[in-house]
Amino acid sequence: LRDPAWRRAVMASGEGSMRSIPDGVGHVGASDLRRLIDSITAQPRPEPEGFSGQEQQPALLQPRSAFQPGSRVGGQERAPASAIEAPPQPPRQLFAEYEKVDYFSSTQERWICGTVKRFHPDDGTYDLDVKQGAKVRNMAKRIYDIGDRVLLHGDHSDRTMKVEEVLEDDHYVLSDCTYPSNPPQQHHVDYLRRLGP
């Protein structure tokens, strides 16, 4: 009973035999001691300030989430993922060397047939037999689908034709758009030109 808190608990419990015990000195019998312990343990234990009722882990033991864009790393603010630019990728070669392609000539204002001679990986341009440094946006593969309109290059004139069927060995069955009554004709891709800009 040398602890003042114990002495106050005894006084509050109404045990008259304990009221005459001076501070720091006293003798307690077994029955009084049992009642004293029962009265103290029956009282609700005060919770420390800021206690939420759940056991909290120390800050160093709490799991750390992955850094989020905009969070601070090493005292500096981390840039958002959208602001981080990926390094530019080198141009991809779309046409093989010696491949025949359609090239739109701005001088002639029409598609002409060309053959790839060289690819420049630094800027993505091509050297053709009809144009040096041709850009990809002015080139197309010499492949046509059913329904496409093409220009059939003839000895005396060019005619607008429509692809009716795709055959093997780069041959196409074409119908004449100017004279629909003419029977379909079979032509090789080398005689065809792409229409449109």
Image (cartoon, helix red, strand yellow):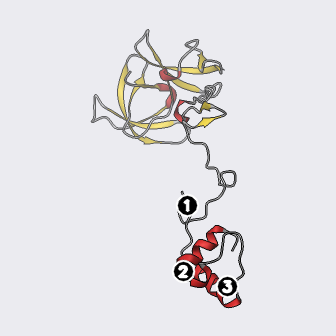
Q: Residues within 10 Å of mark 3 (few under 14, many from 20)?
A: some
First in sequence: mark 3 vs mark 2: 2
Relative height, residue 39 to residue 52 (above, below): below
| Amino acid type, callout 1 | Phe
**Residue sitting nearer the eye, 141 or 5:** 5
Name the residue beneath numbered marker 2: 13
Relative height, residue 11 to residue 155 (above, below): below
Name the residue beneath numbered marker 3: 33
Marks 3/2: CA–CA distance: 12 Å
- Quadrant occupied by the N terminus: bottom right
Q: Residues within 10 Å of mark 1 (few under 14, many from 20)?
A: few
**Residue sitting nearer the eye, 69 or 175:** 69
| Amino acid type, callout 3 | Leu
For image coordinates 37% across by 23% down, the residue present is 196
Quarter of the view holding residue 115:
top right
Name the residue beneath numbered marker 1: 51
Relative height, residue 15 to residue 79 (above, below): below
